[in-house]
Structures are given as structure tokens and as C-alpha cells.
Image (cartoon, grey):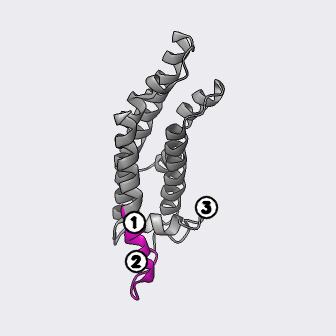
Amino acid sequence: MAGGSCFFSILAATFLLLSTATTANRHHPHGNVSPFCTTATTNPDDKAVCTGLVNGAKTWPEAMTNAIQAAIATGKAAKPMVDGLAAKLPRGLKPLTVESITKGCKDSLDTYVFNLQQCIGFVKNDPFSSLEVYLGGSTFFDCKDGFDEFQISNSEVNKFYDTTVKFADILLSIYQKKPQH
């Protein structure tokens, strides 16, 4: 229980910080949406969240790196939530099912963080357009899918999955702003 509370506290603090900074940015006479965030349009808040994630970056590599690092930090903050999932599964599940779900979620989180860490290197050297592929595939889908497969709902998993999808959309919108040489 403490792991999930810690995760939600960190996630809430992250979004509060981003929304406070970006709300102030939108209403400040000199504040605008970051030029790296003008294509972030999946959700009305995406441009503001994106502007917070790029954290004042002046160059595309800086914007991309800042945003990826924020997504990595959010992924790492989810570890206590993922580690506590077994205790939150319905009683009566077969041990193999519990193991499948929990291992799938741990693997999904590890892959999420690892792929984003790989993206940091691709910001500077990306001869095969790997950055776009990795960014688009960086979500918590496999964990959520494991829960869905067994028709189990978990609000923490759903919330984190939604966050990873939002970040993937935003990171891809920043990627679209990459200068062409």
C-alpha cells in the first residue's frame, strides 16, 4: 500500500509542478508554448505539459533530452507501485497467473525505462531513425494488457499507462520538431 501511495504522490507532484509552471507560463505576458511543443495536440493540456517537460530548452537536443529524462524519472517513480501489484491482485488467482501478471508488469516497466534511456543516445546519434521508433513504443501497454487479459482492473496501472501514452505522444511531437539538415 505504501508503494502505491508513494507512486501516486510522486506522480501527483510531477503533474502539479508541470501544470503550475505551465499555467503560469501561459498567463505570463511573455510566456508562450515552447516552440518544440506546438504540435502537441492530442489533449488540450499537452502543449502546456510539453512546455513543462522541455523545461526552458533553447535547442531541439536539449528539449528532447529534458523531456525524455522527465519520462524516465516518472517511470522510475512507478517502481514501488509495480513492486506492490501482487498484493493488490484479487484473491483466488492461480499462482501462475499472479506470476505472469507481476512479471509482465516488471518487465514492461524495465523495458519502458530502458527504451527511454536508449533514446537519450539517439538524440545525438540516430542514423536509422531509432529515436522515433523507440519513442512511439515507450508505454506501459504490456502490463495493462496483462490485467485486461484476465479482466482485472487496477486504477494505478491504468493511470500510469495513460501517463506513458501521454508522454509518448508528447515526445513524438517534440521529435517532429527535429531540425532537418
The secondary structure type at the circle numbered 2 is: helix
Relative to 160, is 30 on the left or the right? left
Q: Which residues, given as a range, are shown in magenta?
A: 17-33
Q: Which residue is mark 3?
A: 42
Amino acid, disc 2: Asn
Image location of residue 159, percent across then percent down = 52, 45
Contact between labelled residues 1 and 2, with CB atoms less than 8 Å apart:
yes
Which amino acid lies under the numbered mark 3 shown in the image of this protein?
Thr
Q: Is residue 150 above or below residue 133?
A: above
Task: Say which residue appears at 34% left-offset and 66% top-offset.
Answer: 55
Q: Visible in this render: residue 56?
A: yes
Q: Residue 27, image x and y in percent?
A: 44, 82
Q: Magenta stretch: dominant SS?
A: helix
Three-letter code for the amino acid on which mark 1 is drawn: Gly
Front one among 35 and 49: 49
Q: Residue at x 39, y 66 (%)?
A: 52
Residue placed under numbered mark 1 in the picture: 52
Q: CA distance from mark 2 to mark 1?
A: 9 Å
Q: First in sequence, mark 3 or 2: give its number.
A: 2
Identify the image quadrant of the N terminus. top left
Quarter of the image with the C terminus is bottom left
Callout 1: few (<14), some (14-19), or many (20+) C-alpha neighbours within 10 Å? many
Q: Are marks 3 and 2 in contact (CB under 8 Å)?
A: no
Above/below status of 139 relative to 88: below
Q: Is residue 102 above or below residue 124?
A: above
User: Which of 2/101 is in front?
Assistant: 2
The x, y position of residue 129, in whole percent, is 49, 49
As measured in the structure, the alpha-carbon distance from the residue carrying label 3 to the one carrying label 2 is 20 Å
Q: Does any portion of residue 139 appear in the rendered image?
A: no
Q: Earlier in the sequence, mark 2 or mark 1?
A: 2
